[in-house]
């Protein structure tokens, strides 16, 4: 296998699917000659031109509506939002049209629309470029919500998203995009199914479900805790809609303890949903209450030190796991 970045892996998946599927086109702000703010379409404009990589004005609801119509008539649009926060300006179109169209047409219309955007806190991006909004998106029936953590998963999940006939939100943490990892050679075609979690580290004392960047931070914490004799099983859900609760439940049957780590806000969050489902399906397997660890419930500050203070880090994660082990 090669070592390539997360962005390069996802871009390679897009390029491979565009080469075999002429119905795929990409729209977004700066995705043409510039190649995207994070390099998501770098080099593709030179190959496919303006008909398949179209720069847009700042009119989010307008171009999502346009792509909704294109998807209804047989195209496979990709909307590159750069930052997930901008998706909120098209929320009405996504919620009322994109997510509902297949249901309203009794399945006669498909909605193969992929919407991607960067999530997460980091780089002093402050209030308007640091959101994740996973609970809001996961609460909409009809949407698939994908959150890759590794370059391998970014490519495999992107290829699945580009062959899915349901609308997909593909959310990439900005602090993961430059990270490198092993990815098969282009000749080895692979797809990762939605709703299939990954066990990132096996353990026997406690199960930790971590989302996006928190997977890496939790693995670092688990490595430190192993030196203390604490064995942590780390689960990366890969997708939050659908959510693979079966893998989580099987792990809890082994460990008896569960913690969910998510930098998003805690109230009504993904951690609360996971906790509720495991309590429903596996209450008797638990030896302690389910615990959650989240980012601060506050708008994201610009100051680097304040920004760092509101996000879980390996030290605070490790301490939270120690506390859970004692319960």
Image (cartoon, rainbow, N blue to C red):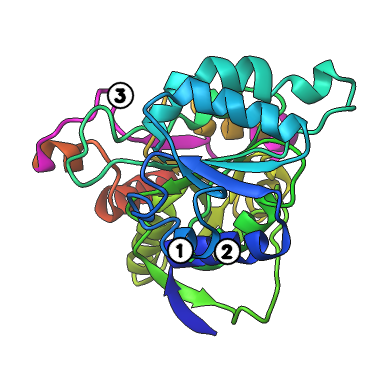
Q: Which residue is mark 3?
A: 297
Whole-number angstrom distance, CA of label 1 to CA of label 3: 43 Å
The residue mark sitting in front, 1 or 3, is 1
Residue 266: x and y in percent read 41, 27
Label 2 crowding class (10 Å Cα cut-off): few <14, some 14-19, many 20+? some
The residue tagged 2 is 15
Q: Which mark is residue 46?
A: 1
Query: Magenta residues?
Result: 278-304
Label 1 secondary element: helix
Q: Is residue 52 left or right of residue 313?
A: right
Nearer to the camera, 166 or 153: 166
Residue at coordinates 74% horizontally, 37% vertically from top-left? Answer: 166
Q: Are marks 2 and 3 in contact (CB under 8 Å)?
A: no
Tell me the SS state at disc 2: helix
Left or right? Give the position of 109 relative to 127.
right
Residue 4 shown left or right of residue 38 in the figure: right
């Amino acid at each position: 296998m090669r070592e390539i970045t997360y962005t390069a892996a996802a871009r390679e998946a897009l390029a491979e699917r565009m080469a075999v599927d002429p119905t795929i086109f990409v729209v977004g702000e700066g995705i043409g000659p510039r190649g995207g703010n994070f390099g998501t379409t770098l080099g593709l404009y030179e190959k496919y031109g303006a008909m398949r990589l179209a720069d847009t004005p700042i009119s989010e609801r307008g171009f999502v509506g346009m792509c909704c119509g294109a998807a209804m008539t047989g195209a496979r649009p990709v909307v590159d939002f750069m930052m997930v926060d901008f998706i909120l300006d098209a929320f009405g179109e996504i919620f009322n049209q994109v997510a509902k169209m297949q249901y309203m047409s009794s399945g006669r219309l498909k909605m193969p629309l992929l919407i991607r955007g960067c999530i997460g806190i980091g780089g002093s991006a402050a209030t308007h470029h640091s959101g994740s909004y996973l609970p809001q998106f996961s609460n909409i029936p009809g949407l698939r919500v994908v959150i890759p953590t590794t370059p391998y998963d970014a490519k495999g999940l992107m290829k699945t998203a580009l062959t899915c006939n349901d609308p997909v939100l593909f959310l990439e943490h900005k602090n993961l995009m430059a990270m490198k990892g092993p990815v098969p050679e282009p000749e080895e075609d692979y797809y990762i199914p939605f709703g299939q979690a990954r066990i990132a580290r096996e353990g026997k004392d406690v199960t930790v479900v971590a989302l996006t960047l928190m997977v890496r931070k939790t693995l670092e914490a688990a490595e430190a805790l192993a030196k203390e004799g604490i064995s942590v099983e780390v689960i990366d859900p890969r997708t939050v809609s659908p959510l693979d609760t079966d893998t989580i439940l099987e792990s809890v049957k082994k460990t008896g303890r569960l913690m969910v780590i998510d930098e998003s806000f805690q109230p009504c969050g993904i951690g609360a949903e996971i906790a509720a489902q495991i309590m429903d399906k596996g209450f008797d397997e638990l030896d302690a209450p389910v615990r959650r660890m989240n980012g601060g419930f506050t708008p994201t500050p610009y100051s680097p030190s304040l920004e760092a203070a509101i996000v879980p880090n390996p030290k605070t994660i490790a301490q939270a796991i120690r506390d859970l082990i004692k319960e």
